[in-house]
Image (cartoon, grey):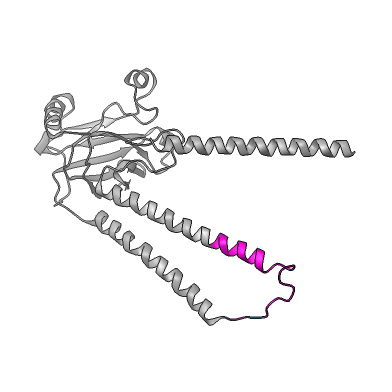
């Protein structure tokens, strides 16, 4: 019986030691890969947010890290209090426990300090909200329509008045293109860099959600309703997102691809798109916007 117990203890130590080694290796690998993560798409073992390329996304990114530091300080403070209580007020070290039931200064402190923490969090959060809800004058309007299960885009008459569908790029086409799996589309939404782009979003059938992590927003596409948002991409590149509203059988196969290019490249693309894609009758219809 004693031999069986000893063997069991050795197996237990071996199991937990192996688990700890795997966890440590995973953490080190995660930190290494996460440092190189995320311009326009997720990467394996990514821990951080995708790199922001708009003003809104940058403010959200900075606010996220501020909250992480605040939470870390609070967790370490509470952990220190717990350790102090265990060491100082255990039965051996403190055989005659205090019968104190109230401490005015302590009660004032644990009321005021959380209020100050919330104020410190509220100020930058209101700043992010103000940036999101500002309404700058648009350099370009694009209408985005969600379908089950793909996206379509309509450009105004000022740049050619055309529309096109964007379906999931899969199979051999996806392999040949070298694009990320389940994130690339056969046609991309193309916008110029450093220009204010407003998108008007709706849906043709069920609710969808147009989400672009690197731009720092997602917006619901609702049948019969027109939602609007803006962004100004500050870096050229190809950025990927997905529908973020559970919309049916192929919800997971409804990616979004936005290509941010120079003004010259955008002019060349619109000239080609006029002939490549079907022109809308009289141009796409947009709601009034600044």
Residue under the image location 43 percent in, 53 percent down: 68
Left or right, 16 with respect to 154, comes to: right
In the rendered image, is residue 158 in sight? Answer: yes
Q: Is residue 189 above or below residue 130?
A: above
In the rendered image, is residue 150 in sight? Answer: no
| Outermost residue to the left | 158
Count of marks placed on residues: 0
Q: Is residue 113 above or below residue 211?
A: below
Horizontal and vertical percent position of residue 97: 70, 76
Horizontal and vertical percent position of residue 34: 42, 38
Q: Is residue 61 above or below residue 83?
A: above
Horizontal and vertical percent position of residue 163: 20, 33
Q: Nearer the viewer, residue 43 or 95?
A: 95
Residue under the image location 80 percent in, 37 percent down: 8
Q: Nearer the viewer, residue 47 or 89?
A: 89
Left or right, 224 with respect to 252, comes to: left
| Outermost residue to the front | 93
Q: For the N terminus, which image quadrant?
A: top right
Q: Is residue 277 above or below residue 133?
A: above
Based on the picture, tell me whether residue 82 belongs to the magenta stretch.
Answer: yes
Horizontal and vertical percent position of residue 142: 20, 41
Left or right, 116 with respect to 216, comes to: right
Looking at the rendering, the stretch of residues picked out in magenta corresponds to 78-102
Residue under the image location 36 percent in, 22 percent down: 174
């Amino acid at each position: 019986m004693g031999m069986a117990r000893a063997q069991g203890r050795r197996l237990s130590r071996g199991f937990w030691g192996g688990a700890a080694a795997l966890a440590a290796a995973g953490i080190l690998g995660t930190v290494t890969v996460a440092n190189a993560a995320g311009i326009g798409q997720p990467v394996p073992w990514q821990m951080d947010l995708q790199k922001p390329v708009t003003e809104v996304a940058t403010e959200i990114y900075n606010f996220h890290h501020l909250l992480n530091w605040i939470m870390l300080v609070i967790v370490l403070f509470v952990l220190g209090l717990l350790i102090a209580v265990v060491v100082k007020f255990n039965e051996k070290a403190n055989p005659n426990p205090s019968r104190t039931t109230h401490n005015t200064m302590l009660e004032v402190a644990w009321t005021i300090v959380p209020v100050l923490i919330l104020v410190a969090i509220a100020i930058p959060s209101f700043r992010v909200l103000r940036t999101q809800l500002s309404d700058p004058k648009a350099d370009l309007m694009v209408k985005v329509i969600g379908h089950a299960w793909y996206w379509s885009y309509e450009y105004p008459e000022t740049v050619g008045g055309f529309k096109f569908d964007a379906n999931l790029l899969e199979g051999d086409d996806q392999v040949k293109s070298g694009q990320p799996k389940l994130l690339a589309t056969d046609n991309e939404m193309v916008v110029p860099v450093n220009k204010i782009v407003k998108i008007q979003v709706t849906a043709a059938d069920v609710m969808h959600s147009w989400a672009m992590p690197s731009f720092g927003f997602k917006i619901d596409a609702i049948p019969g309703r027109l939602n609007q948002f803006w962004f100004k991409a500050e870096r050229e590149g190809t950025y990927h997102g997905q529908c973020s509203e559970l919309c049916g059988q192929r919800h997971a196969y409804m990616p979004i691809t936005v290509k941010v290019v120079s003004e010259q490249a955008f002019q060349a693309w619109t000239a080609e798109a006029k002939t490549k894609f079907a022109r809308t009758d009289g141009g796409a219809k947009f709601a009034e916007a600044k």
